Image (tube, rainbow, N blue to C red):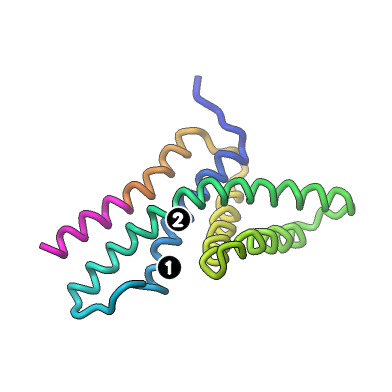
Amino acid sequence: MPIRLKPPISRKVMSGCISACLFAIVFTILEPSLWVEPESVGHLLSQVWGTISVYLIYSFPVLLVYGSLTSMLSDWLVSSFTTYIGSTRPLLQKIMLAALHLLFGCILSYIGILAALLYFLVDLWLSRKPEPYRAVHVLISFCFPVGLFLLAVISLQLVQS
């Protein structure tokens, strides 16, 4: 018998895994290095791969735990509020969800806003599937951050040698 997770939990965990990878890549593009200026192309590549792995190490647990919990809280708040006012307009719900995600992301300044925006977009994209995600999908989504981290570390070693 396959393991079944509650539908929002599995989607939220998958959103955390995927958005952590996207955040590490996008934030590396925006802030390639917080420490030193590159001296050559090889040095720049080394910094990029090293920075991706560092950003991923720190962003993955935050997006997985904090992002998933605040996203579930946002879903519950929006659902409760729209039920209370008697509105079922999906656009209003999405705008309210986006606002709450960004509000929860403000805690970590612009870095948190970027992470919250990416998490919201990934979760919105994953929510388009009508049937719930299974545990195997969640396990596969954990391969993304692990794979990106391994790719970054291996590429860093190849660039430095």
Q: Amino acid at mark 1?
A: Phe
> Which mark is on residue 56?
none
- Can you name the residue that lies furthest to the right here? 85
Q: Position of residue 108 (x, y in %)?
A: 56, 63
Residue 152 lies left or right of residue 136; in this view the side is left
Label 1 crowd (10 A; few <14 / some 14-19 / many >=20): some
Q: Nearer the viewer, residue 112 or 134?
A: 112
Q: Position of residue 59 (x, y in %)?
A: 45, 55
Helix, strand or loop at label 1? It is helix
Helix, strand or loop at label 2? It is helix
**Contact flag, marks 2 and 1 (Cβ < 8 Å):** yes
Q: Kindly indicate the quadrant of the structure image that contains residue 110.
A: bottom right
Q: Amino acid at mark 2?
A: Ser
Vertical placement of 63 versus 116: above or below? above
Question: Alpha carbon of mark 2 to alpha carbon of mark 1: how far?
Answer: 10 Å
Magenta range is 149-161
Q: Is residue 154 magenta?
A: yes
Q: Magenta region, mostly helix, strand or loop?
A: helix
Identified at 50% across, 51% down, the residue is 62
Residue 156 lies left or right of residue 93; in this view the side is left
Label 2 crowd (10 A; few <14 / some 14-19 / many >=20): many
Identified at 51% across, 66% down, the residue is 111
Q: Which residue is mark 1?
A: 27
Vertical placement of 123 versus 108: above or below? above
- Can you name the residue that lies furthest to the top here? 1
Q: Is residue 139 magenta?
A: no
Identified at 54% across, 56% down, the residue is 122
Q: Position of residue 89 (x, y in %)?
A: 80, 57
Residue 151 lies left or right of residue 25; in this view the side is left
Q: Which residue is mark 2?
A: 59
Vertical placement of 14 versus 53: above or below? above
